[in-house]
Amino acid sequence: MLGAAHPEKAGPLVLVPEVSQHEIRVEQGFTGADLLLYGAILTPEGQPVAGDYDVVVVVEGPPRAVVVREKRQVAGMWINAASSSFRSAPGFYAVASSRPVAGIVDSRTAAIYELGLDWLQLSPIGSIDPARQQRFARGLVDHMQRMGLYHEDPRAVSISHQVLYQARITLPSSVPIGDYTAETFAISKGRVLASGLTRIRVDKQGFARFIADRAEHAGLAYGLCAVALSIAMGWIAGRLFARV
């Protein structure tokens, strides 16, 4: 999680999380992936937990710096006006829970563990007015939601026999490459009883990886090749149309 200090957990319980894919390969024609997150929650003696509890799963990563710009209409044209920078905003963020988070924990606990978009900590750079910061943060979250990179589903986790849980989270085709975390929380009466963490790697493969590596490590050569290829394709297209 982003800079959150976890308070002492009630327990003891044993939470064993797992994920269907620890590595997701982004190749040509990649249309997204479905992650199955599952596991078991037991007492240290291996017995089912007495009483009801809820499960919340948070998939997050990779963090990046983001600049959010506000557009305003001036003389009939839309131009960039004010802006705000965030030091560490997740490139992907999804929350799945057994019921709405607001009914599971209070706002303080939700903020500590970042259980939901309303409590996501985006680490703004510099000191700005809180109202302005909140406006830009809402704008960033709304933009990422429209892109399919931020979302929450309050009914996505199912619990079987008070032992096994599972949830499905969809990664869109535009999901950024990098390291992800999937953190699972077992919660009862507003208290986190146990948590467990698994890691996921999203990486490019094949020709997509080659292009990404060249763009990152040989930017000048990549740019020159791209320009040369565009000119060549334009010249070939011109010659072909000239013969028609």
Image: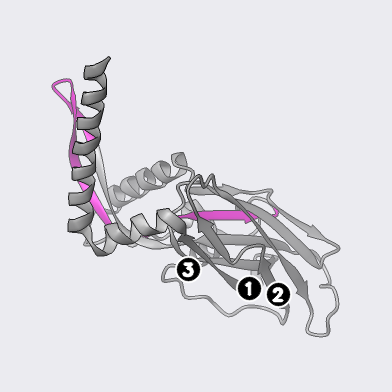
Q: Residue at position x 79%, y 65% from top?
A: 164
Q: Is residue 158 above or below residue 243?
A: below
Residue at numbered disc 2? 16
Q: Is residue 182 left or right of residue 223?
A: right
Residue at numbered disc 1? 195
Give the magenta part as a residue range: 71-98
- Element type where label 1 sits in the image: strand
Residue at numbered disc 3? 1
The amino acid at mark 1 is Ser
Q: Residues within 10 Å of mark 3 (few under 14, many from 20)?
A: some
**Is residue 91 among the parts visible in the rendering?**
no
As for residue 239 lying within the magenta part, the answer is no
Q: Which of pointers 2 and 1 indicates the residue nearer the eye?
A: 2
Q: Which of the pair 90/84 is nearer the observer? A: 90
Give residue 227's position: percent from left, percent from top: 19, 44
The amino acid at mark 3 is Met
Quarter in which the C terminus is drawn: top left
